[in-house]
Amino acid sequence: MTRKILVSSLAAVVVGALATPALAQSARDSINVVGSSTVYPFTTTVAEQFGRGGKFKTPKVESTGTGGGIKLFCNGVGPQFPDVANASRRIKAAELASCAKNGVKDVVEVKVGYDGIVVAQSKAGVALALSRKDVFLALAKNVPDPANPSSLIPNPYTTWKDVNKSLPAVKIEVLGPPPTSGTRDSFVELYMEAGCRAYAWLDALRTQDEPRFKRACGTVREDGGYVEAGENDNLIVQKLTANKDAVGIFGYSFLEENLDKLKGALVDGVSPTYESVSSGKYPASRPLFIYVKKQHVGVIPGIAEFLAEYTSEKALGEEGYLADKGLVPPLKSEIGKIRDDAKNLKPLKL
Amino acid sequence: MNSTNKPRKTPQETQAIVERSLSRRYWAERRFRLYGLAAVTAGMLFLVYLFFVIFSNGMGAFRQTQVRLPVYFDPAIIAPEGQRDIESLRAADYPALIRAALKAKFPEVEGRAATRELTRLISGSASFDLQQMVVGDPGIIGTTEEIWLLGSDAVDLMAKGRVERDVPEDQRPLSDTQMGYFDKLESEGALALKFNANFLTGGDSREPEKAGIWGAVVGSFYTLVLTLLLSFPIGVATAVYLEEFAVRNRWTDLIEVNINNLAAVPSIVFGLLGLAVFIGFFGLPRSAPLVGALVLTLLTLPTIIIASRAALKAVPPSIREAALGMGASKIQTVAHHVLPLAMPGMLTGTIIGMARALGESAPLLMIGMVAFIVDIPQGFTDAATALPVQVFLWSDSPERGFMEKTSGAIIVLLAFLVVMNTAAVILRKRFERRW
């Protein structure tokens, strides 16, 4: 009996060792998608509908974050590299260049819609009507000195009233995403930098010395006013319901799902609703993209059909299933061009 | 010197001293017991609270709201030209069947917007169930059947009372008109909570009402089987060699320190290693249970080696000496006598290592097993997720319906852990020998 155990365990080791090299990657029959966690809920919905159609296997969708996803996507051409990348911001010129260096020549950009970055709080809290300048002043590490606006001092504000007399005297306590998140990048761009530009000299800095502008405007305070609440937006929602004075920052779809517990703050006088985000009236909305590797079309089965499904009226239309999932679809005036570019696989040029 | 000068105490005096201190000593003992009891109680309270939260949130996942509708499998919708091939049956407009069935139930509803509100009561994936029925048995076309269709997650939330009825309309997932339909269906007995078999047998889905755990269970199974096949023989062989054969010198000391060190390395590090070596260098597929198993093998090996060595050490030297004395060779001593006696301890260590591997999600994050995968994996190189990863993915989804699915998945994971740990206890109880 003992001998049997020994022999069988030895056999298992040998089998394991032999099996490993024999499994080198061969051709793939399902689409691989990587990238942004913000676009993930929408791409997965399309993937599921696409797979249930029955002609192709359901695509695999990984949530790696925009930056990580584009890096994987740009690593090369071949079945071991992903075919599609989700992005909650536009691809950067440097990223496109690294793609080209690795042989990924033609990248097709498809704008799939918009996401609003909302500032939300518990329904029990005192309603906030913020300007983006208020948000910048409340959350930046260094702010312009009220006495001498052309110099920066460490952020002295502890309540919203300190920031702006018309706001309630509630302690500044903001739960938001950590720096690794695409939502954080967008928050910094749409709120912090936009609010910062209310000061003329800082706005001038943007064209003269961009790195300094980014440092001055994009650095978030670390003294407890801003709490990094992790990538999990549901966690922020839970913490907001437990603490009526806290304010949270996340994507519009989470607000829409939790309207019975949360309310969105007015930003520059506009409240975050489906209509205001899609029309661009809400100041903090950002476009969402997917990027497709043209060289894989025709090699990996189903990519062209997947794109057709993604841009179809059934998915991306105003009443499509993605709108049900909280995506704010592209404007009617844009959608024709988006559909054509996706169909013709028009390569992106920056 | 002192003792001789002191007057000797009589037994009575000693007795008195002891009696005086006795109550203090009893009290100290009682206090110590109380501390221990308090510690255990506090731990139990946390555990009970945790279980209460998970079960009260998660039991709902095992029941799902379904709506009974008489569905007419209209040949004019499914196969207008009378075709019966699978391809065109698949492509037919099944949502239209559901719309027609709903309209037959609520004939007063008219207009596009109102119809849309009505169809939102039924899950978007219900049409795929009809598709499966028709493709499975085309003979059904032309008949009318009473079918329990999946309700949408909004209906499910209302039926389970997760959202209060009396909140204002724009903050409720169902509008006032939809509540009217809801109440009518409920009063007719056409809306009920039913056992959600799909949660245990289905793959992942973006619709909370359709999402199932089976894909993740199968992924975890493939990963763990391979982990066991790789780590148990390697671990036991290492332990036997180090404990029974190796000479003790600086090299074996170094190896021992390294093994103990590896046991304490954060698991994400093994994930990074797997990403660089197995995927980057050997070119193995991302998201495959094979790579997951290789990474988890590295993770569990130190645990198994340490437990196996402890089990070997616990075998009394007299056994070895007796075997050697009877003329057995070294390998016979180990294989015939020491190893069988140490086996229960080794198995216990292995199962505990496996239980840890089952609960790991951090290293799988790096090798792409955190992904949306609908199809049930068919082998070691198919894309797969694992149970803890499924918990992580669902907890991060915006749809409210996923909250209870998250807890439901935790319950399933806990059940597997309980089974494994119980097996470890039983193995130890049954086969352990004491000397």
Image (cartoon, coloured by chain):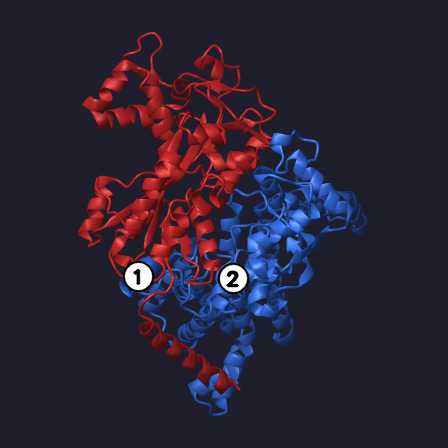
Q: Would you say residue A178 is visible in this rendering?
A: no
Q: Count the marks.
A: 2
Residue B234 x %, y %: 41, 73
The residues tagged by marks 1 and 2 sit, at their Cα atoms, a distance apart of 22 Å
- Residue pictured at 53% horizontal, 61% vertical: B80
Type of amino acid under label 2: Gly
Chain painted in blue in the figure: B
Q: In the figure, is residue B49 to the left or right of A189?
A: right
Residue B278 x %, y %: 32, 63
The crowding category of the residue bearing disc 2, from other C-alpha atoms within 10 Å (few below 14, some 14 to 19, many at least 20), is many
Type of amino acid under label 1: Gln
- Residue pictured at 32% horizontal, 48% vertical: A342
Furthest residue in direction bottom, as rendered = B327
Residue A231 x %, y %: 45, 41
Q: Chain of mark 2?
A: B
Q: Can you tell which mark lies on residue B215?
A: 2
Residue A345 x %, y %: 28, 50
- Tint applied to chain A in the drawing: red
Q: In the figure, is residue B2 to the left or right of A116?
A: right
Q: Can you tell which mark lies on residue A312?
A: none
- Compared to B304, does B116 lie above or below? above
Which residue is tagged 1? Answer: A80
- Compared to B177, does B407 lie above or below? below
- Are the residues flagged by discs 1 and 2 in contact, CB closer than 8 Å? no
Looking at the rendering, which quadrant does residue B181 occupy? top right
Furthest residue in direction top, as rendered = A147
- Compared to A284, does A72 lie above or below? below
